[in-house]
Image (cartoon, coloured by chain):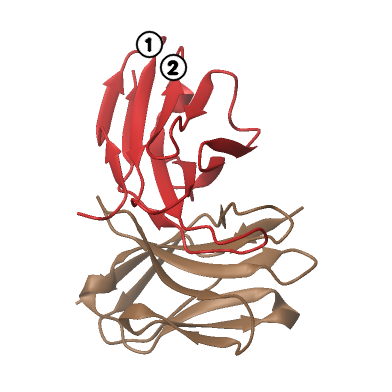
Chain colours: A red, B brown
């Protein structure tokens, strides 16, 4: 499978616990994005990496959220001290960036559904 | 403020009937425009996109969309709907001053009657 993969697909946790999600982009893609989708809504942008550099962060990304892409390949999104409002689908996407000012299609993974009890 | 609006939350059409899903955006220039489809348990799949040029764009699965600058709209159409088209459809925009992030509308859930 050469698409974007995410792990786990589902996560149930108790309020106050920490969770970590992983995203593996398409292998040659240098750009990686995280979005959050709550029930009945469209996805909302969280953050974006080009290679290992985190270039943009949404104001939605509170200090309880941290994302990394240490070697410019896979990425992790950690949520500390989870709250019930964090329950959502977390989507990862990747693209092949070919230069500043260019836009290339983002390919999405299947998402990780988080439920905070 | 920059925004994307899909006025119809749910639409039901009969199989074989035509379909139009509406999308409007608020922005002072022409953004990059996209339509995605999301089926249960599946990731978002790109149906079509508009960057510039011909305002009528063709996509996959028989879909097309028309960009109308005067109406700030990018409506999705299909002449004959199939039962397998039942899904959630999202209009998305890249505002040219906002980096590479996609801004999505709230989505339209399409149901298809046999």
Compared across the picture, whether B110 is left or right of A32 comes to: left
**Image quarter (top left, top right, bottom left or bottom right) of the C terminus of chain A:** top left
Q: Kindly indicate the quadrant of the structure image that contains residue B77.
A: bottom left
Q: Secondary structure at mark 2?
A: loop
Instruction: From the viewer's side, name the closer residue of B31 and A69.
Output: A69
Name the subunit of mark 2: A
- What label does residue A17 carry, if any? 1
- What label does residue A82 carry, if any? 2
For image coordinates 47% across by 60% down, the residue present is B9
Q: Kindly indicate the quadrant of the structure image that contains residue A112.
A: top left
Q: Secondary structure at mark 1?
A: loop
**Residue A8 location, x and y as percent?**
25, 32
Mark 1 or mark 2: name the one nearer the start of the chain: 1
Relative to B48, does residue B18 appear above or below in the rendering?
Answer: below
The answer to whether the residue labelled 1 contacts the one labelled 2, judged by CB atoms less than 8 Å apart, is: yes
**Residue A53 location, x and y as percent?**
57, 36
Number of other residues with Cα within 10 Å of mark 2, as a class: few under 14, some 14 to 19, many 20 or more? many
């Amino acid at each position: 499978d050469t698409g974007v993969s995410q792990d786990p697909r589902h996560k149930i946790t108790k309020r106050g616990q920490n969770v970590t999600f992983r995203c593996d982009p398409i292998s040659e893609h240098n750009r990686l994005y995280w979005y959050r989708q709550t029930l009945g809504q469209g996805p909302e942008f969280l953050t974006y990496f080009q290679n290992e550099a985190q270039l943009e962060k949404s104001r939605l990304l509170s200090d309880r959220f941290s994302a990394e892409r240490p070697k410019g390949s896979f990425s992790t999104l950690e949520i500390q001290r989870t709250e019930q409002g964090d329950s959502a689908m977390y989507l990862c996407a990747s693209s092949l960036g070919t230069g500043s000012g260019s836009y290339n299609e983002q390919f999405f993974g299947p998402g990780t559904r988080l439920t905070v009890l | 403020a920059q925004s994307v609006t899909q006025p119809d939350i749910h639409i039901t059409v009969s199989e074989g009937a035509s379909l139009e899903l509406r999308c409007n955006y608020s922005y002072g220039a022409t953004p990059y425009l996209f339509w995605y489809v999301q089926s249960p348990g599946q990731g978002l799949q790109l149906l079509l996109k508009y960057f510039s040029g011909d305002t009528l764009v063709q996509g996959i699965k028989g879909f097309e969309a028309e960009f109308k600058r005067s109406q700030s709209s990018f409506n999705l159409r299909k002449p004959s709907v199939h039962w397998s088209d039942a899904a959630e459809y999202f209009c998305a925009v890249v505002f040219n001053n906002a980096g590479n992030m996609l801004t999505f509308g709230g989505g339209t859930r399409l149901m298809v009657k046999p």
